[in-house]
Amino acid sequence: MSQPDASSEPNPARRVFLSKPHMGGSERGLVDEVFEANMVAPVGPAVDRFERELEAYTGIAHAAALSSGSTALHLACILAGVEAGDEVWGPSLTFMGGVSGLVMRGAIPVFFDCAPESWGLDPSLLEAELSAAKRGKRLPKLVIATDLYGQSCDLDALLDVTSAHGVPLVTDSAEALGTLYKGRHAGKGALMAALSFNGNKIITTSGGGALLSDDGDLIARARFLATQARDPAPHYQHTTLGYNYRLSGVCAAIGSGQMQVLEQRVEQRRQLYHAYKSVLADAPVRFLLDQPDSRETHWLSVAFLDRHGPETLRLALEQDNIEARPVWKPMHLQPLFKEARFVARWREPDTNRAVCETYFDRGICLPSCSQLVAEEAEDFERVADALSRFF
C-alpha cells in the first residue's frame, strides 16, 4: 500500500479558525452570580439585564432574549401574520437560518438577487417586483432583508419601497451586531430585527439570539410565544401554540460579559479587514467594501477573487491548518429550494450568472477571529504568509 504524499498533509501548527468565541474576562464572574442566585432558568435578573443592555446599545426600544437568531426570525414571521401559502420575499444570498422560519410557517419563499455594492437585497429590484405584484394583487406578506457579513442592507431605501406598498419589513441582522447604518444600529427602523449570539458571531452567549422592535406589544407577544404561550392560569393552559425559545440565565450572563467588550471586538474585526486589504493590495482580489455613512463590523472579511476559484484558495489554506469558507451558497441554488422563484438583477452575457451567483463562485470568507489582532497576532502572520505564497 502506497504512503500518502507528505506534501498533502495539513500543517500540524495550531489551527486558525474562521471565527471563534473571544471572551472578555468578566463572563465567568457573571455566570457565578447566576449560579449563586440559582437563577439558571430562562427567566430572572440576568435575562432582564441582558435585554436592557441590548436595548441601550442598539437604540431599539424593546428586546426579547431568545435561544437563537433563527428562532427570532420564526417568531417574527408569526408576529407579522405569515400563514401557510403566503409569499415571503428576501435575498437569495443569505444563511439558511434567515429562511427556515418562514418555511416552518408553510410560507412560499421568493428569492432576490443582491445589489452589487452592499451584497444586500436590491431596492430597485424589489420595487419593480412589488409594483408588478400589486398590479396582479399578489403582494407578499413580509419582506426579510439580510445584513450580510456585518454590513447593513440599504435599509432606508428598502423601507421606502416596502412602506409604499404596505408590506412590513424585518431585518435578519444576525451577523450585524455593532453595525451602524447612517448613524443608527442595523435594523433600527424595521418592524423587527433579529440578532444572533452563536459561537461564531462577533460576541456570543454560546448559543442564542434576540428579537428587537420599537413596538413593545410585538416583543411582549414574542416573550409569550417563546415561553410555551402559557395562559395566565394556576394550571398549565394553552389557547395558542407556543415554543420553548427563551434564553437561559447562564447564557444571558455570558452575553452581559460580552457586551462589555463589544466595541473592542468591532474595532478588532475592522482592523483585521484593513490588514487583509494591505496584505493583498497587489493581488487580484477585491473586498466587500464599506458603504457611505455606515460602520461595517466586518464580522467576516470577505474577498472576491478575480482569477482564482475560492475552493483552490480554501484548500491551500487548509494545508496550513487555516480555516476559510465559501460565501453563502444562494438559497435558490439549494436543493431544498430548487422549485422556488428567483428574481435576478441581471445575468452576465458570457456566463449567464446572476450577481449573487457570481459572488458565490468567486467569494471566500477569510479567518476573522478578533484574536488575530490581539493575543494571536502571530497566527495572522501565518495567514498573511499563506495568502502571499498562494498569490
Image (cartoon, grey):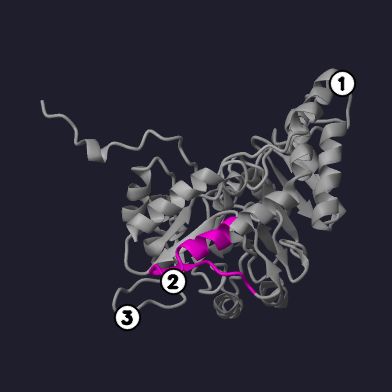
Q: Position of residue 198 (x, y in %)?
A: 62, 41
Which residue is rendered at x = 32% and y = 74% of the image? 352
Are the two marked residues, 3 and 2, in contact with CB atoms closer than 8 angstroms?
Answer: no
According to the picture, the residue beneath numbered tag 3 turns out to be 349
Q: Nearer the viewer, residue 126 or 228?
A: 126
Q: Which of the marked residues, 3 or 2, is nearer the chain's N terminus?
A: 3
Give the image quarter of residue 248.
top right
Front-lying residue, 118 or 194: 118
Numbered badge on residue 355: 2
Q: Mark 2 or mark 1, which has the lower sequence index?
A: 1
Of labels 2 and 1, the one closer to you: 1
Badge 3 crowding class, 10 Å Cα cut-off, few under 14, some 14 to 19, many 20 or more, is few
Residue under pointer 1: 37
Residue at 54% of width from left, 74% of height from top? 117
The image quarter containing residue 90 is bottom right
- Is tag 1's residue or tag 3's residue first in the polypeptide sequence? 1
| Quadrant the N terminus occupies | top left
